[in-house]
Amino acid sequence: AFVTSGDVTNPLVSTAGATSPPDNAATRLKSAISNGGTVQLTEDIEISKTLLVTRDVTLDLNGHVLKMTGDGSVLRVSDRATLTITDSRPQNPHTEPYAGLPAGGVITGGKGPNVTGIYYDYVGGAVFLENGTTLKLEGGTLTVNSGSSIYIDGATLVMSGGTITGETVGVHNNVGTFTMTGGRITGRSDRGVYVYNGNMTMSGAAYIGGNPNARKEDIYVYESDHKHTDLSVTGGTIAGKVRIVFLESLGPTQEELKAAANSVVKEQGVFDGHIKVEKGTSGTCVDYNSVNFIDEVAKT
């Protein structure tokens, strides 16, 4: 069902027209990922249990579909491992039963765990990143995974390509680091990115927007202690809203509010929409447009 690098005699290499039974393909995929290295899908695969990544792995979706049919995240990264997701055939069309999915490699169907005390149920439907791990998202589409598509638990996400779409939240960053230099986060029902006491940097060709049915912001930053959070946009496009929330009980000063606001837009960042700066949870916000944001924050 897939090819592993460095071993052309490996029985996992498919021959022309050959297919593997779904259960067999899933078992072999699990084994290959646990061994580490490069794994390339050669057909659509359905799994019923989470694929655990404990060694550095490059997963090339190769235009195929990886679908979770049970509960849990599709992929879970632990033991300080690095997972890289790529797609060698981004234009590959799908036939039934996947004809409705976007072209190219797709990860879908995941339902991440329900983490106690974490806002939004079932985080990390596509990929759950444990503390100290890394995900490099370079291609493919993560779609229709319950809750948030990617959950960062004190981990690192570097997104340079690919698309995240069709979930409640695209990326849930919990005291982690999210660097977005490319790719798209779009089609959300709630928020594009949720940052809780974490860091996010956006630049290059990155795009967040196209969420016409989203109830809330494209980027939502919740800052509770003035120590761990930073949002910096030096490029890319946010076609929607950004909201920064401070806990009112901590009494943020004007200087702290100003520093946070100034950290948001730098150099060539483009905001097509509004930026809300809220102190506390009372709902009292200052709502800026992209033109006067920095100047007006300095006067407030």
Image (cartoon, rainbow, N blue to C red):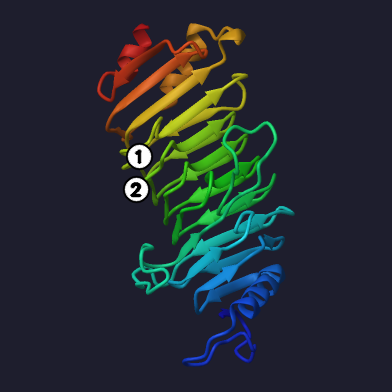
Residue, far left? 291
Q: Which residue is mark 2?
A: 205
For label 1, the SS is: loop
Left or right position of 76 against 216: right
User: Residue 47's spot in the image, x, y percent?
Assistant: 61, 67
Under mark 2, the amino acid is Ala
Q: Are marks 1 and 2 in contact (CB under 8 Å)?
A: yes
> Dividing the picture into quarters, in which one does residue 96 lie?
bottom left
Q: Which residue is mark 1?
A: 235
Q: Residues within 10 Å of mark 2 (few under 14, many from 20)?
A: some
Left or right position of 281 against 184: right
User: Residue 54's spot in the image, x, y percent?
Assistant: 72, 60
- Asked whether residue 229 is in view, the answer is yes
> Dividing the picture into quarters, in which one does residue 56 lie?
bottom right
Question: Mark number for residue 104?
Answer: none
* Figure quadrant of the N terminus: bottom right
For the residue pair 205 and 63, the one nearer the viewer reads as: 63
User: Residue 91's spot in the image, x, y percent?
Assistant: 33, 70
User: Residue 235's spot in the image, x, y percent?
Assistant: 35, 39
Identified at 51% across, 43% down, the residue is: 171
On screen, residue 131 above or below 97: above
Identified at 58% across, 66% down, the residue is: 58
- Asked whether residue 265 is in view, the answer is no
Residue, far right? 79
Q: Residues within 10 Å of mark 1 (few under 14, many from 20)?
A: many
Under mark 1, the amino acid is Gly
* Figure quadrant of the C terminus: top left
Q: How many numbered dots are placed on residues in this image? A: 2
Mark sitting earlier along the chain (1/2): 2
